[in-house]
Amino acid sequence: MNRAVGRADSMLTPESRGLPVVQATVLAAKAEILTRKGEFDEAAPTARTALTLPAAQPDGIRSFTRSERRVASLAAAGYTNREIALKLYVTPSTVEQHLTRVFRKLSVKRREELPVELCTDLLLR
């Protein structure tokens, strides 16, 4: 388990520190590992930090409309705006508008920063 904690720490590079979604995910995983190891004194502040990042705020993914969630899921899976528009029978402009609102709600700037959890929506359909 010490390797897992070290691996989580190594994922928090200066580049990822600017990506709240990545940072929140890594810190949450690290807190879970520390809890399993019984290192509660270190786990608690790590979990607290993960929960205070914008990506971990409850108004994120749960605040999406159904349309925003469908568009965000496809974008997270790697589809282009044009491919998403064709798949959902909407215009590329509509896709752009949905993604703009999604990015704002998640405090991200690029589709590469979208949470991987969004891709699971595609598997559930």
Image (spheres, rainbow, N blue to C red):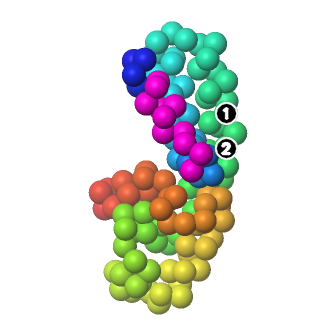
Q: Is residue 87 left or right of residue 57?
A: left
Circles 1, 2 touching at the beta carbon (< 8 Å): yes
Residue 107 visible in the shown view: yes
Distance from Cα at disc 1 to Cα at disc 2 = 7 Å
Residue most extreme to the front? 14
Location of the N terminus (image quadrant) = top left
- Residue indicated by mark 1: 49
- Say which mark, if any, is on residue 53: 2
Q: Position of residue 94 (x, y in %)?
A: 53, 84
Q: Quadrant of residue 27?
A: top right
For the point 60% across and 65% down, the residue is: 109
Residue 10 sits inside the magenta stretch = yes
Q: For the view shown, which residue lies furthest in the right direction?
A: 52
Highlighted magenta segment, given as a residue range: 5-15
| Crowd rating for badge 1 (residues with CA inside 10 Å; few <14, some 14–19, many 20+) | some
Vertical comparison of 57 with 70: above or below: above
Residue 23: give x, y in percent of width and height.
Answer: 57, 43
Q: Amino acid at mark 2?
A: Leu
